[in-house]
Structure formats: C-alpha cells, structure tokens
Amino acid sequence: MTRPLLSIALLGLGLLLAGCATSAGGGPAPSEPVKQPTVTGPADGGPSAHALALFDDANQAAAAQAKAPDNAALERRYDAVRQADPRLAEADFNLAVLAERQGKREQAFVLYRSALDKKPSLKAAAEALARLTQEQGDIPSAIAQWTDIAQKFPDDAGSRVALAELYRHSSDHDRALDFARQALIRDPKSMSAYKVMLRSHLDRKQYALAKLVGLRALKIDDKDPDLYVALGDIQLAEGQPDQAAIQFKKALEVRPDHTGALTELARLGLADQDYAAAEASLRRLVETGAATAEVQLALGVAYKGLGQPDKALAAYDAAEHLNARLAAIYLDRGILLQRMKGAPDRALEQYKRYVDLIGGEGQLPGDSPVPSLRREAEQMVRAKAEAHKVEEQARTPAPPPSAKPPAAATPTHP
C-alpha cells in the first residue's frame, strides 16, 4: 500500500512547490517605511515643521527598534504626526506598513490609499496597493494598477517585472516576455526579470531557451538560489532527476533553508522511496518554519517508510493540527494503525473520517485502497474478538467435578 501514500504525499508537496515557483519570480516585496518625505517644509506649502520633526523622531524610534519593534508605540508616534499635520502622506504610508506587518490588511489598504490620495507621486504607496490587490487574487485590477505605475514612471523596472509575472501566471507568455525585456532595458541586472523569463520559457516547454536565460543570469549573480532551483526544474522537465538534484543541492549551498530546494529534494526522495533523504529534507523544512500540513503529512509517510510508526503518528497529528480537513492524513494514519500498530478498530475510524471528508463513498476512485483496507480491518477486528474470547475461556477455571453419591452397601449373608 506504499504507492497510494506516496502519490498523496507527492501531490501535497507538488502544491507547495507551485507556491514556491510562484514566488520565485521575484514578485513585489512587502513595503518598507518611508524614512524621509520629499518636502522641505512650510515654505513650499508642504507639511508643518512640527509635523516633520515628529516624523523624524518616529523614524528614529523605528530604526532603534528594528530587531524588536513596539508596533503599538510606533503607531502612536506616526498617528501624532497625522494629528500635527494631516497632509503628510508619508505618515499614512508608514502606519499602513505597520498595519500590514500585524496582519491588518484591510486597514493597511485604506491607509495606503489615503497616502496616495494625499500625494499621487508617492510611488511606494501605489506599489503597495497594486501588490495587495495582486495578493488578493484580483489579477485584472492588479494589472491595471501596475500598468498605471509603469506609465507614470517610464524608467521603472519593478513595475514591468510585476506585469511580466502577472501575465506569465495568466499564460500570456508573449506579454510576459515583452515586459521582462522592458525591465531588463531599464535594469540590465534585474534578476527578477531574468527569473520571469526563465519560468515563462519553462512553462512553454522551451527548455533550451530557459537554460540560456538561466546561465546568463548566473553570470550576473551565481549566489541566487532561485536560479539553481529553476535550472533543476528544467532538468526535471527533461526527465533528468539526478541532474536536477545536483541543482537543488547547489541552491542549498547558497541558502541552506531554501524552501523550494528542500521541497524538491523531499519530493524526489519520496518518489524514489529514499525515505532517509526525504526525511532529512522534510525535517529541515519543519525546522525552518515551513511546516505546512502537506509537509507534515509527507514527513509522516517518510517516517512510516523508515519503520518509525511513533514518529509518523506524531507527524500526522501535527498535520491534523495545521489542517484538520486534509483527508489524506486519516487514510495514512489508518493504514499505519492497521498494519504497524495492530489497531484495526482505530483504523476503521480513520477510514470513515477520510471518506466523510472526500464527500462520501461515491467519491472514492475505482482504484482506491479503502474498500479492501476496511474488509481487512473488519476481519482483523473479528479475529481479535474471537481470539479474545478463546483466551478468556482458557483463563476461566474448569468447575470442580461433582461429588459421586456413596455406593450402596453390599448385603452380607450369614
């Protein structure tokens, strides 16, 4: 029953890899606070000197707290700037950055919009709004926003990289490549543009062109782990997993905690049933904080393959804690309980949960192992019950033999 488990674990890691590939193109980075407004003071009709002084104090406090920021205190400082002079758009922008860092995305969106309304030339605010729109999945609106930025700032490479990546994910590779080239014209060393071009060629199965782009990029920066991962993905697409593994290991030499490289190596290990190699990569993913439910599930499969059922069960528990609706957890756990722990009754509970989560019996594929697993588990339950009954009977002492009535006296004759 190894293959079904491997296919499930590989599918989960494949989904994680899709996310890694999405971010590997060098998309927009989170906003950083503005440190200095581009105004000189009240002489040019700008914010008051008092507001600028408060803004400078707030920035100094933010710099002093760079490693352990007190977000609430910084918010009070920047809010005091707004109170002193509402015209200072940079104060709104920095409050938006703080809100976003705390996960308050809606509040951040409103503040970025306020900053841009107050100062249409504040490019950082326009970029932040476009990025948030993109992250929310509204691709048409994001394209429109990045296009507006590109038009307002003709020399800007970043907006064109963002457009290239958006068009790549929309499968419009002609536009993706065009905008990537435009970005390189403005910034010949833009690694983000090179990575978008590489991925676009890879998506189109133009492997020779993808390799060429990757090699050109390496001449500019041979310390970028994303490039090695992308080159490894080309090798995988060409059916050369051993060569791909070499590239992924190069990525880890540059950055030992690179999520994409570790995930790829884990996937290759599981596919080859090299559970020790898979476990090492998956455990490293957990240690680096990239422990999704799918990673924990795959780690459980690896531990099971290594014959370590207790560690596997702990990994399944961790996966369930992260996503209790990931159906494969219950199938994998049930098989382990049935085959390695001798607990068929508990296994049946897991199979029931699995079937419920996938939508019922009618959603079981024709080659699903669940029906045969259940029959086997039910037989084990009956066999255990019968064995228990026999054991109980063996332990019960036999009743003592009943006393025989005394023999009748034999008459004596004189």
Image (cartoon, rainbow, N blue to C red):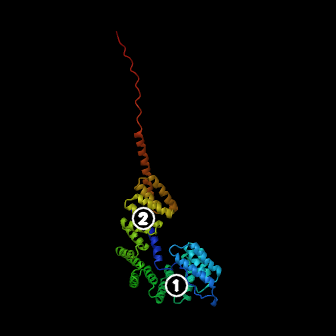
Q: CA distance from mark 1 to mark 2?
A: 39 Å
Of all residues shown, which one is farthest toward the top? 414
Disc 1 marks a residue whose amino acid type is Ser
Q: Quadrant of the N terminus?
A: bottom left
> Whole-percent x and y of residue 149?
55, 86
* Along the line of sight, the residue nearer the viewer: 413 or 327: 327
> Are the residues flagged by discs 1 and 2 in contact, CB closer than 8 Å?
no
> Whole-percent x and y of residue 95?
59, 77
How packed mark 2 is, by other alpha carbons closer than 10 Å (few <14, some 14-19, many 20 or more), is many
How packed mark 1 is, by other alpha carbons closer than 10 Å (few <14, some 14-19, many 20 or more), is many
Looking at the rendering, which quadrant does residue 392 occupy? top left
> Whole-percent x and y of residue 102?
56, 72
Disc 2 marks a residue whose amino acid type is Leu
Looking at the rendering, which quadrant does residue 411 occupy? top left
Residue that appears at 44% across and 48% down: 382
Does any portion of residue 139 appear in the rendered image? no
Does any portion of residue 219 appear in the rendered image? yes
Using the image, determine if residue 361 lies above or below residue 156. above
Kindly identify which residue carries mark 1. 159
* Sooner in the amino-acid sequence: mark 1 or mark 2: 1
Give the mark count: 2
Residue that appears at 38% across and 59% down: 308
> Whole-percent x and y of residue 179?
49, 86
Image side of residue 212 versus residue 362, left or right: left
Kindly identify which residue carries mark 2. 299
